[in-house]
Amino acid sequence: MAKFLVLGGAGYIGSHMVNYLLQKEHDVVVFDNLSTGHPKALLSEHFELVDVLDLGGLHWAFQKHGPFDCVIHFCARSLVGESVQDPALYYQNNVMGTLNLLNVMRKTGHSKLIFSSTAAIFGEPMQKRINEAHVCAPINPYGRSKLMVEMVLKDFTKAYGIDSVCLRYFNAAGADPSGKIGEKHEPETHLIPNILKSARAPNESALKVFGNDYDTPDGSCVRDYIHVNDLADAHFRAFQFLHENAGAYCFNLGIGRGFSVLEVIRAAEKVTGKRIDYEFALRRVGDPASLVADPSLALNYLGWQPQYTRLEDIIQTAWDFMQADDDRGAS
C-alpha cells in the first residue's frame, strides 16, 4: 500500500483519481482550494483546504500529512477562452503554483510527481495523430503555461532529482459508472456535458457549435475523447513506472481516434433517445481544428490500455451521472 497526495482531488479528474486509488486500498490525502472542486466530490477522509499559491500553507500541509510516496498534481486553470482573456491567471496559477509545489517537495524530501498536462501544448497539429515528438507550439496561454511547467520539470529532474511523468490528456470525458462522481463545472464549457444538458432541457436555447468551417470532414472540430477512469489508470501506471525509471517523461493519452462535434451530438442522441437542437456560432479563439493522440508510447511503456473506446459508452457514463445527480438534487 502506498500513500498519495492528490492536489485538486475535489475536481473532476482529481476525484476520479482519488476514487481509483481508494478502490485499490491506498492511502490518499487531498489538497484543494475548492475554487472549482466540489466538497461532495471529496472521497478521502484526509483533506486540507490549501492553495498552491500559498507557499507557507502548502509547506505546513506537507509537514502535517506527509511523507508521500507520490504527488499527483491536478491543480490548474484549464479554460482556453479564459486564458486568452486573462493570461495572468494562468501563468500565476499553473506556473507559479507548480513552482511552489516543486520547491516544497524539495524542502520536504519528496521526489515523485505525476503532472496533469494537456494536448494544448502542441498547437495546430502537423500530422493526423500526434505523438510525443510532435513540435510544441501552443496557440493559447493555457497551453503555453502547461508547456512551461513541462520544461521546468525537466530542469528540476536534472538539478534536484525530482522524477516526473507529464501526462498529456486530449479530451477527458465520461464519469465513474457508479454515478456518484462525474463532470460538474460552473459554468460548463466542455462539449459532452453541454450536449447532455441540451438533451435534458430541450426547450432552452439551442446548443452552440463553435465553427463549421474547419478543415475537417464535416467542418466541426475533431477531438480524441478519453474516459476519466482510463486517465486515472494511466496515472497509477505512471507512478509504477517512476519506481523503475528515474527521469522526466511525457506521454500522450487518448484512444487514438477523433470524433467531430457533430458526431458527438449524433452519438448523444442515440444514448439519450432525445433530439438535440444546435446552431453554429463563430469559432472560439485558440481552438485547433483537430487534436487526435498517438498513444503508442503510453501503451508500450506504461502497459496502459484504455477500456472505453466507444464514444457511446463514454457518453453513457456521463448521462448516467447527470441523471443520478438530478435525482440527488431533487431529493
Image (tube, grey):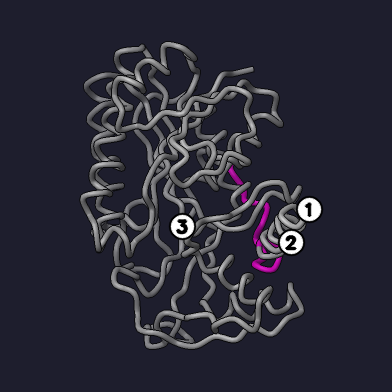
- Asked if one can make out residue 42 in the rendered structure from this viewpoint, the answer is yes
Mark 3: give few (<14), some (14-19) or many (20+) Cα within 10 Å.
many
- Residue 198 in the image, given as x and y percentages of width and height: 61, 76
| Dot label at residue 220 | none
- Quadrant of the snapshot with the N terminus: top right
Give the amino acid type for the residue marked by disc 3 in the picture: Phe
| Residue under pointer 1 | 331
Inter-mark Cα distance, 3 to 1: 35 Å
Q: Nearer the viewer, mark 3 or mark 2?
A: 2
Q: Pointer 3 and pointer 1: residues touching (CB < 8 Å)?
A: no
- Residue 162 in the image, given as x and y percentages of width and height: 33, 22
Numbered disc 1: secondary structure: loop
Inter-mark Cα distance, 1 to 2: 13 Å
Numbered disc 2: secondary structure: helix
Q: Nearer the viewer, mark 1 or mark 2?
A: 1
Inter-mark Cα distance, 3 to 2: 26 Å
| Residue under pointer 2 | 323
Q: Pointer 3 and pointer 2: residues touching (CB < 8 Å)?
A: no
Q: Residue at x 65, y 53 (%)?
A: 175
Give the amino acid type for the residue marked by disc 2 in the picture: Gln
Is residue 147 on the magenta stretch?
no
Mark 2: give few (<14), some (14-19) or many (20+) Cα within 10 Å.
some
Span colored in magenta: 304-314
N-term-proximal mark, 3 vs 1:
3
| Residue under pointer 3 | 170
